Image (cartoon, rainbow, N blue to C red):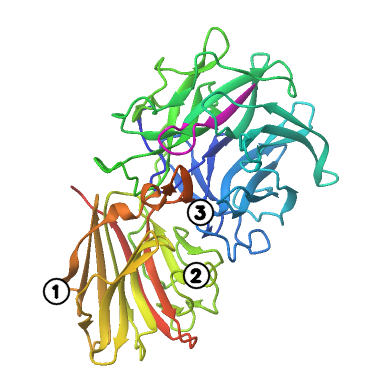
């Protein structure tokens, strides 16, 4: 088997949870406010991965209307036992300030591709829940517990409680089994049983540049867990030169041949800004048990590597994904996401004009409710995206076009609208930490154009927009813009040591429409192309 090159899941794919079922490997990753919820990726060799679906595809499973930026689905945990897949996830309703409203649920399926069940409510005491299946058939749910009290450690430890499948609820006493190490910010728990011990894997140090995976163990499931005296299993905190930064939040899997691997989140910062426009991605490292029974990287160090020795498995590549979505099928590509609610015929129709995606303009880009926006993850630092839109606005309150989006406070938007003097026109909107601007001195008239082709070219920290009447001759519009504005690092706002705003996602690029008059004027998009570029 050749080497694996990290990251294995590029672009916004954080908090990986991995399992093996027979010869198949599956990773679940967080989706936050993007719908459908939870990405499931499949592999046969741990090197090549394919997105196969989303378990949370109905509002009855995940109702995120009104959820804040970077709320929604945090840190899902995927497990499998006795013919059933189990997926536990958090729906975060608020996460700034002293309180966090974090509701934890469980769904199940007999097939990884679904259908998945209606959710069972578990608790709201914290986030990052996981399920441990004991050898005797009992099931246990872990999560970090949040302590809002002044002067207390907000990350109050890892708690565990038994889950009753018969009653479909948590039962019995709640045990706090691990208070964490001096790294602090203890979260993301998973338990594995090996070599006579229960091994507790946690994420610590926060999901920024101090992130880490730490290990603790106990002779009993509910007993006191002792931390690894060697410190973190994995971290980049002391290696600023490392290619993979922000390394932490891991999950363990064993191959058919007994080889061990940990998948973990990481970030690849642009330098010197240290902004991760692709968000938190998923990487993999080979691990082994040490002579004294602790899990360690096979390199003997704790720094994550870009090149990792692959397992003793035949390679299993997948066919490349098509670059262009033509909107001529009954459903759109699984790589597209929407904000907080599922794609619905009422506002995003593939039927009203076959061969086009018709978006009806709804609320503004600042809304946490009804946005007509369809986008996909940016998964490379070198990207070109293109679309063409037919749109006939009669008011400046009506807009449609191509958007480069992080969250409601951070985006760049090349949009068609209407001006009283110019008629149909093109403009650029941007929002940087919620500060709105229009960088063009004046809109560009495209009065009389039936169609307008739009293109965005992203090269590392640079974003450029272009437009065309025929899709052949392209004109630049606006200057070179700073793509690093669309990153967790820029979204975070700290004053006097207190976080006033946070972000945990990554850059998306897509299409959208707004009609602030409430008339829901539609825009028709003929195609959307996402192409990764060479240097």
Q: Nearer the viewer, residue 131 or 124?
A: 124
- Residue 207 is a magenta residue: yes
Is residue 376 depicted above or below 90 in this figure?
below
For the residues labelled 3 and 2, the Cα–Cα distance comes to 14 Å
Residue 212's spot in the image, x, y percent? 47, 29
Mark 1 falls on what kind of element?
Answer: loop
* Residue matched to label 2: 367
- Residue 522 in view (yes/no): yes
Determine crowd level at label 2: few under 14, some 14-19, many 20+ residues with C-alpha closer than 10 A. Answer: some
* Residue matched to label 3: 70
For the residues labelled 1 and 3, the Cα–Cα distance comes to 39 Å
Residue 251's spot in the image, x, y percent? 54, 32
Range of magenta residues: 199-211
Q: Nearer the viewer, residue 343 or 21?
A: 343
Left or right, residue 303 beside residue 156:
left
- Quadrant showing the N terminus: top left
Determine crowd level at label 3: few under 14, some 14-19, many 20+ residues with C-alpha closer than 10 A. Answer: many
- Residue 240 is a magenta residue: no
Q: Residue 473 carries which label?
A: 1
Q: Residue at x 58, y 11 (%)?
A: 293
Residue 343's spot in the image, x, y percent? 53, 69
Pointer 1 or 3: first along the chain: 3
Is residue 277 depicted above or below 211 in this figure?
below
């Amino acid at each position: 088997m050749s080497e694996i090159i990290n990251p294995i899941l590029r672009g916004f794919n954080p908090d990986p949870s991995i399992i093996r079922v027979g010869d198949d490997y599956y990773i679940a990753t967080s989706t936050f406010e993007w719908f459908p919820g939870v990405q499931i990726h499949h592999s046969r060799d741990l090197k090549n991965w394919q997105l196969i679906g989303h378990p949370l595809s109905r509002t009855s499973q995940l109702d995120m209307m009104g959820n804040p930026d970077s709320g929604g689905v945090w840190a899902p945990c995927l497990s499998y036992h006795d013919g059933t897949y189990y997926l536990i996830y958090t729906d975060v309703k608020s996460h700034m300030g002293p309180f966090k409203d974090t509701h934890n649920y469980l769904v199940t399926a007999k097939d990884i591709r679904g259908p998945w069940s209606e959710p069972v409510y578990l608790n709201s005491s914290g986030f990052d829940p996981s399920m441990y299946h004991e050898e005797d058939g009992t099931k246990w749910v872990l999560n970090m517990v949040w302590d809002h009290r002044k002067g207390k450690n907000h990350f109050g430890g890892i708690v565990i409680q038994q889950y009753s499948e018969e009653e479909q609820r948590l039962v019995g006493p709640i045990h706090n089994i691990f208070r964490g190490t001096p790294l602090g910010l203890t979260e993301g728990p998973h338990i594995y049983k090996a070599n006579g011990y229960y091994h507790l894997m946690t994420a610590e140090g926060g999901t920024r540049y101090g992130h880490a995976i730490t290990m603790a163990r106990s002779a009993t499931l509910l007993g006191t867990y002792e931390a690894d005296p060697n410190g973190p299993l994995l971290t980049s905190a002391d290696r600023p030169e490392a290619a993979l930064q922000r390394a932490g939040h891991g999950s363990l899997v064993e191959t058919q041949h007994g080889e061990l691997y940990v998948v973990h989140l990481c970030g690849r910062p642009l330098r010197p800004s240290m902004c991760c426009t692709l968000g938190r991605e998923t990487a993999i490292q080979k691990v082994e048990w040490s002579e004294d029974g602790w899990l360690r990287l096979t390199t003997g160090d704790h720094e994550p590597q870009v090149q990792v020795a692959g397992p003793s498995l035949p390679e299993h590549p997948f066919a490349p994904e098509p670059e262009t979505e033509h909107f001529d099928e009954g459903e759109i590509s699984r790589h597209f996401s929407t904000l907080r609610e599922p794609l619905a015929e009422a506002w995003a129709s593939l039927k009203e004009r076959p061969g086009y995606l018709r978006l009806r303009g709804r609320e503004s880009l600042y809304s946490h409710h009804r946005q007509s926006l369809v986008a996909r993850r940016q998964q490379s630092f070198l990207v070109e995206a293109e679309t063409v839109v037919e749109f006939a606005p009669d008011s400046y309150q009506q807009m449609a076009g191509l958007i480069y989006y992080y969250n409601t406070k951070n985006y760049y938007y090349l949009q068609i609208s209407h001006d009283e003097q110019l008629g149909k026109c093109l403009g650029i909107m941007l929002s940087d930490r919620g500060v709105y601007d229009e960088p063009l001195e004046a809109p560009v008239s495209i009065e009389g154009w039936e169609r307008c082709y739009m293109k965005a070219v992203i090269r590392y920290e640079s974003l450029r927009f272009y437009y065309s009447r025929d899709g052949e001759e392209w004109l630049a519009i606006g200057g070179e813009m700073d793509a690093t504005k669309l990153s967790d690092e820029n979204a975070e706002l700290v004053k006097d040591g207190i976080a006033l705003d946070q972000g945990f996602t990554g850059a998306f690029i897509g299409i959208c429409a707004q009609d602030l008059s409430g008339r829901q004027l539609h825009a028709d998009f003929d195609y959307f192309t996402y192409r990764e570029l060479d240097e």
